[in-house]
């Protein structure tokens, strides 16, 4: 009688989780160093008095855009796009906007402010994230085939929409963002 050898169960690669955690900690540290985890900085951005948040976020957009498309060009990564719709954007903007208006933090800055030990972020921010997530989860079955599907535009990107090489869009957009950052800085905002 032959003895059957069972194959060992496949071990799931957990390295992406550790990379995600490491980059999340680095991102939080950089948000803190940039000053955008402070309530006053965020509120002053909303009042169009202090443009620190815009400068940090646009810098992150340029860095991320060039980094992602460079890695894609070298074959290191493949973009895994999620389908989108105008309905999804409206619902997401409403949830995001209400939270932002009520507390003065966005999800990323809440995490950074919690790391700083700010009580308003710990109590209000964490509670808001949990409550908002729960409300959305409860409402999702009714929303998924209704408003979330309205204006479906699929998994499109600007280069795909324009039927051009990625860099035909990335380079001018990056240049425009850099010029905007320079203008903001020179204007004293």
Image (cartoon, rainbow, N blue to C red):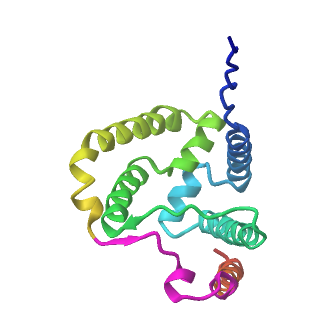
Q: Who is closer to the viewer here, 132 or 14?
A: 14
Side of 17 relative to 154 (left or right): right
Q: Residue at x 70, y 72 (%)?
A: 69
* Residue 101 coordinates in the image, percent (x, y): 39, 54
What's drawn in magenta, residue-wise? 151-171
**Image quarter in which the C terminus is found:** bottom right
Q: Residue at x 66, y 35 (%)?
A: 12
Side of 90 relative to 185 (left or right): left
Q: Residue at x 51, y 70 (%)?
A: 48
The verdict on residue 96 being magenta is no
Q: Residue at x 47, y 35 (%)?
A: 126
Looking at the image, is 164 positioned above or below residue 148? below
Q: Who is closer to the viewer here, 20 or 186?
A: 20
Looking at the image, is 23 positioned above or below residue 69? above
Total count of labels: 0
Looking at the image, is 129 positioned above or below residue 36? above
Looking at the image, is 25 positioned above or below residue 54? above
Quarter of the image where one finds residue 66: bottom right
The verdict on residue 159 being magenta is yes
Q: Who is closer to the viewer here, 40 or 176?
A: 176
Q: Which residue extends farthest top? A: 1
* Residue 175 coordinates in the image, percent (x, y): 70, 85
């Amino acid at each position: 009688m032959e003895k059957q050898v069972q194959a060992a169960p496949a071990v799931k690669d957990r390295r992406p989780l550790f990379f995600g955690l490491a980059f999340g900690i680095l991102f939080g540290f950089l948000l803190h160093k940039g000053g955008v985890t402070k309530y006053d900085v965020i509120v002053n951005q909303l009042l169009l008095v202090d443009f620190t948040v815009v400068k940090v976020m646009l810098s992150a957009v340029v860095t991320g855009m060039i980094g992602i498309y460079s890695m894609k060009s070298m074959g290191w990564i493949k973009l895994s796009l999620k389908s989108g719709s105008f309905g999804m954007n409206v619902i997401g903007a409403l949830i995001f906007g209400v939270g932002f208006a009520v507390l003065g933090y966005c999800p990323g800055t809440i995490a950074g402010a919690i790391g700083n030990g700010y009580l308003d972020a710990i109590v209000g921010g964490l509670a808001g994230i949990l409550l908002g997530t729960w409300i959305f989860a409860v409402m999702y079955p009714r929303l998924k085939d209704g408003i979330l599907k309205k204006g479906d535009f699929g998994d499109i990107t600007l280069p795909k929409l324009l039927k051009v090489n990625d860099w035909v869009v990335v380079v001018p957009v990056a240049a425009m963002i850099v010029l905007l950052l320079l203008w903001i800085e020179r204007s004293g905002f």
